[in-house]
Image: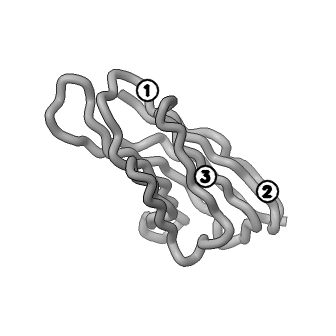
């Protein structure tokens, strides 16, 4: 099982980007998927999370600008980022709490990270 993130890049302030993260392999179920970010010199912080029950939560710093969504059939999570600011610059990581086929417990999995740079 692995998570593959994509969609990062360089964007001007006020611009938009959409990140994607697909979980692949023998997955029995996923109870939540999330996006985190880590800027140089900072701790990794939770950006947004979506649960299998449809609950979504956001960091205060991104509320109203970022939207997390999930395609349960494709085991994919998206992060639509609008009105980007320079302070959104970071490496973004996707994360899933999932149960692999044959397991009776959940495991935290991480994607490889994708760089988002907001700069003029």
- Residue 106 to residue 117: above or below: above
Cβ atoms at labels 1 and 2 below 8 Å apart: no
The residue that mark 2 highlights is 11
Q: Is 85 placed above or below 27 here?
A: below
Q: Which mark is residue 114?
A: none
Q: Residues within 10 Å of mark 1 (few under 14, many from 20)?
A: few
Marks 3/2: CA–CA distance: 15 Å
Q: Earlier in the sequence, mark 1 or mark 3?
A: 1
- Can you give x and y, in whole percent of width and height, for residue 20 in the image? 60, 41
Crowding at dot 3, Cα within 10 Å, few <14 / some 14-19 / many 20+, comes out as: many
Which SS class for mark 3? Answer: strand
Quadrant in which the C terminus is drawn: bottom right
Q: Secondary structure at mark 2?
A: strand
| Nearer-N-terminus badge (1/2) | 2
Q: Which mark is residue 24?
A: 1
- Residue drawn at (49%, 50%), measured in percent from left and top? 93
Disc nearer the start of the sequence (3/2): 2
Near-viewer residue (1 or 53): 53
Q: Residue at x 61, y 39 (%)?
A: 6
Label 3, on which residue? 79
State left or right for residue 89 relative to residue 59: right
Question: For the view shown, which residue lies furthest in the left direction?
Answer: 104
Whole-percent x and y of residue 15? 81, 61
């Amino acid at each position: 099982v692995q998570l593959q993130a994509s969609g990062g890049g360089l964007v001007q302030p006020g611009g938009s980007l959409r990140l994607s993260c697909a979980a692949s392999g023998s997955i029995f179920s996923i109870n939540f998927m999330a996006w985190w970010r880590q800027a140089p010199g900072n701790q990794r912080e939770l950006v947004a999370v979506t649960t299998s029950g449809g609950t979504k939560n956001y960091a205060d710093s991104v509320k109203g600008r970022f939207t997390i969504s999930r395609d349960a059939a494709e085991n994919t999570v998206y992060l639509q980022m609008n009105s980007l600011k320079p302070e959104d610059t970071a490496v973004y990581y996707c994360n899933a709490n999932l149960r692999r086929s044959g397991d009776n417990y959940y495991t935290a999995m991480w994607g490889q990270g994708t760089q988002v740079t907001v700069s003029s």
